[in-house]
Amino acid sequence: MIYFRFGERFCNIHTISTSKKAKTMDFLTFLSSVIKSLAWPVLLASVLYYGRNDLFKLIRTIKSIKYDKFEMMFEEQAAEAAGEAENISGKEKDNSERYKDFVFLSPYETVMKSYMKLEDSLRNAVRRKVDDGTIELPSHSHLIRLETMHGATLMRLLYKTGLVDVDFAALHDNLRNLRNMAAHKHNFEISQDAAKNFADSTIALIDKLEEI
């Protein structure tokens, strides 16, 4: 009986709380609509007061601050990836000869092309292991489908069969995320050093894949 009363009281409190929450949401919705309705008049007044050029400069500055964040993230994570790649390869390697493929490319193109080479190497490693029976693709899969598999899927196949370890898989995942950042976050600059760190990391993984 006591529990029932407590249950009733709890239910009443919950109802009151829900009612207050609904009123709060109604107020926030109203406030949001007011802000939206004022946005264009404020923008127009700003253009008239400050001048269009000054306002555009301000917008560009705000955007540059945002993209600087991505540049910093890419720079730091590419450097970390290079360190992890060195640990995986077991020694510091001179990749200058293999880096020639990227010398005349922009940093962005270097990132895109080097990851593409890594994905091709993943696919070739999986194909070799399908041919020798180490990897068995699902019954509905075949080699034609293998050509369309993304790097994450190919890596999963190698990892599940114990052909690569968790550090290798984690580094690939980091590089894939960086590649996606470069592909989808436009208008931020990738430095030459960051691009080289990225490419060196992919080369280290490719060397390991060629041993499988």
Image: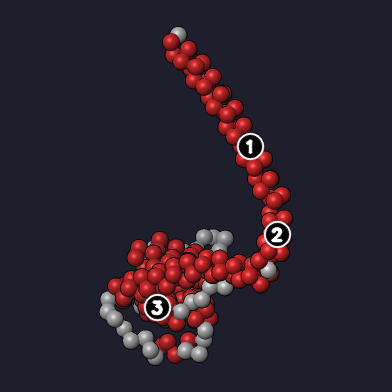
Of the pair 179 and 187, the residue shown nearer to us? 187
Residue at image position (49%, 81%) is 107
Check disc 3 and report the residue beneath it.
Answer: 197
Q: Give the distance between the C-alpha atoms of the residues marked 2 and 1, in whole angstroms.
A: 27 Å
Q: In the image, which is nearer the foreground, mark 2 or mark 1?
A: 2
Residue 209 in picture, x, y percent from top left: 39, 75
Residue under pointer 1: 27
Q: Would you identify the image quadrant in which residue 141 lies?
A: bottom right
First in residue order: circle 1 vs circle 3: 1
Element type where label 2 sits in the image:
helix
> For the residue marked with disc 1, what is the amino acid?
Phe
Residue 124 visible somewhere in the drawing: no
**Is 185 placed left or right of 101 in the picture?**
right
Number of numbered discs overlaid on the protein picture: 3
Q: Residue at x 68, y 68 (%)?
A: 51
Give me the residue at 72% from left, 60% from top.
Answer: 44
Looking at marks 2 and 1 on the same chain, the residue that comes earlier in the sequence is marked by 1
Which quadrant of the rendered structure holds the C terminus?
Answer: bottom left
Q: Is residue 182 visible?
A: yes
Q: What residue is at 72 percent from the left and 55 percent from the top?
A: 41
Tag 1, which secondary structure?
helix
Query: Do the numbered discs 1 and 3 sit on residues whose CB atoms are within 8 Å?
Result: no
Q: Nearer the viewer, mark 3 or mark 2?
A: 2
Looking at the image, is 177 positioned above or below residue 42?
Answer: below
- The residue to which callout 2 is attached is 45
**Observer-nearest residue: 158 or 32?**
32
Q: Amino acid at mark 2?
A: Ala
Name the mark nearer the viewer: 1 or 3: 1
Residue 114 in the image: x percent, y percent? 48, 79
Q: Give the image quarter of residue 28.
A: top right
Which is nearer the N-term, disc 3 or disc 2?
A: 2
